[in-house]
Image: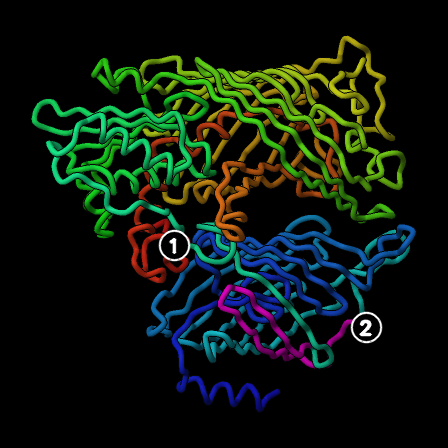
Amino acid sequence: MRKIILLSLLLIFIFVETVNASTGMNTGLTGLWEYPTAEMPDDGVGRFGYTKATPYGFYFLDLAWLPWFEINARFTTFNTIKTGVKRRRDYMDKAIDLKVMLWHSKDPEKWIIPSIAFGVVDMMGTELMKAWYGVATWRYKNFALSLGYGTDRFNGFYGGIEWDIFDWLTFKAEYSPLDYTQDGYEKGSKVFKGHEDMLPDKKYNAGIVLKAPWGMEGSISYQRGNEWVFGISQKINLNGPFLGNHKKNYGAPGDMRVAEWEDIESDILISKIQSGLEKYVRVRDVDVKLDSSNHSHKLYLSYENYGYSSHAEAMTRVLVVLAAVMPETDELILIHKNAGIPIVKASFPGSLLFDIRARSLRKEDTLNTAIFGWVGSQDIQDPDAQDLLKHKAQHTVKAMVVYEPRLDQTLDDDYMDRWDIDLVYQGRYYGGWGSVVDVRFPIFNNIDTQDYTGLWWEKDLNDKIRLQQAGLTYANKLTKDGRLWFFGEGGWFDEEWFGTNFWGRYYGKDGSWWIGARASAFHDRDPESFAGLTEGTYRYYSGWTSDRPAEHEWYMPYWIQAGYHLADFDLDINLSWGRYVNKDKGYKIEVVRHWDDTALGFWYIDTDVHTRDKSFTRAGVHMEIPAEKWLGTLFGNSSSHIWEQNTILHSWWHAEAGREGGHIRTPEMMMNQLRPVAMKKNVEKLLLDYCKFDEDEDNENSKAATSLLEYIFH
């Protein structure tokens, strides 16, 4: 081992490549083998994978959630701890690891100044492997040296090297004083620490990482002086399709422009625009008006996106088609509608079309002069152009395959699932009205909901054909400036709830802040019927019961709410206070990071009813995953469907506290992407990406990670 390390140090000055591709620890967090470094992936980039390091198995998902903040979520299996259920499976423990980049040394030639990071591993739950740490990393071209200190399990000072020999091969070695006696083991029904037989034979680990061009990595290492460790992971990037090529194919038409306005009649040009959009862009309800008065040429165009999970992508594709069709123009005004309602207006200089055609777009020139704002009745003065704001009815019928997995290690059958077919109708009517009907047909189900061997607390996961969702929705503006909105809905929200929701929202001029309120009324559904309600209310107890008096069968929660948008990171901070479903009062803090149509965030609820052994009520993660991020990678297809999920992070929670009820379509689902401040940022990003000739060409969306201090003092 000493010879290997000395040989590595002697060869650091004869590198054949200049790359800086950080790799992951056994647990997934960016680092050496068992210890983290002061490096992390680029913003929005991460990895998921598995490492077998007996007696552990690590399933992980790692992500640079902010340019200077890395999050690693993992499940760890312990051969040394059994679950206690019939088949005595290995204990599985979930954990969250965090890293904050305090200072990032970006120049690999100035290696004297290190990057500095600190963080915590296993910060919640059982905390069987918890440790705090601080680390510095010096990088010179392909070589990195890290020195750090960790508490608890990390057991003092550690250090190691990382050498990127080629762009496909990395060598890593470390000094590891890890204290394995801090790890857990089972005695009876309790978990203890102090596993003496986990002491390593050696305190050195070394191995290699092999990297494939498509982002897959495989590792093999010799650790603790007695164990071969194997790992595999796949890179993901939330800035584009999760896997594969991140350069979108816009399928733009060839140059169909007319040299001068005088060379073509307006009706023919409008027809060319509409046919181009119909062929190359999945938008509908397209209305076009040309204005050639006052010695200037303006184009007014309104449309609704139906084929893309990203509204910014829909607008970008519209602009690409216009660049191929339009003659020289002074101004473009695009009106983007959602659910039949005009929401956001974008005004571009006509020179933008030339820049798009020439692929010479520069943010500091053309894009900075673009103006995004809410659509108000005063925005289009021309009476003829007011026709662009009219609503048109649309009807959609589709079928979807739905997969519902359930994982709970306390059950005999710890992994269960159900496959369904959903038949869905969606309607968009006049005046902001809409509807949805979703009937779910289970086709394969191995989820047991009958007794304690299965999921007795999810009785709705049965074999019944049920009305999954059905109801009416309404949304519209209450003021002429387009900033005060009312949202309402009623019906069957999901498998558990029937009722109504009402929201009022007032947005800032550019959508960077909002204030509002929500009031709801809910009733429990009968899990054994197609669409029926319970006579009383279901309770999470020793199974489901319906034993409350009838006068308590309706829940009446309410909240006051506010939100703020950090444009630098497309980050939302939302606050609410009020009465929850079970009359417990308290507040919720939610922080959600967006990558255009993809979102990952965390929420925390604290009411006057706390979960056992906790100082709060509930905490969880919020995800919005577009189907297009997978379809675009695998098949090149687009889809407007976004999978939304809220998951509780801790193992135990108070079942009748911190509950918010169900919904069909929240204001966030309808408005978040279309706020002027977010829409402008994302359209700019996509246009700049489109105009790049080289996929590897640098732009502001592919910069290396910055640091917390840079952000604070910049």
**Is residue 402 depicted above or below 299 in this figure?**
below
Mark 2, residue position:
197
Residue sticking out furthest to the left = 295
Of 581 and 436, which appears nearest the observer? Answer: 436
Determine whether, in the image, residue 457 is placed left or right of residue 149. right
* Mark 2 neighbour class, 10 Å CA radius: few under 14, some 14 to 19, many 20 or more: few
Q: Residue at x 46, y 23 (%)?
A: 339
* Mark 1 neighbour class, 10 Å CA radius: few under 14, some 14 to 19, many 20 or more: few
Q: Dividing the image into 4 quarters, which one contains the N terminus?
A: bottom right
Residue sticking out furthest to the top = 551
Of 23 and 2, which appears nearest the observer? Answer: 23
**Is residue 632 depicted above or below 669 in this figure?**
below
Q: Are marks 2 and 1 in contact (CB under 8 Å)?
A: no
Q: Quadrant of residue 53?
A: bottom right
Q: Residue at x 85, y 17 (%)?
A: 547
* Callout 2 secondary element: helix
Q: Residue at x 34, y 68 (%)?
A: 107
Q: Quadrant of residue 264?
A: top left
Give the amino acid type for the residue marked by disc 2 in the picture: Asp
Residue 603 shown in magenta: no
Q: Identify the magenta region.
A: 197-223
Of 289 and 218, which appears nearest the observer? Answer: 289
Q: Is residue 608 visible?
A: no
Determine whether, in the image, residue 713 is placed left or right of residue 495. left
Mark 1, residue position:
709
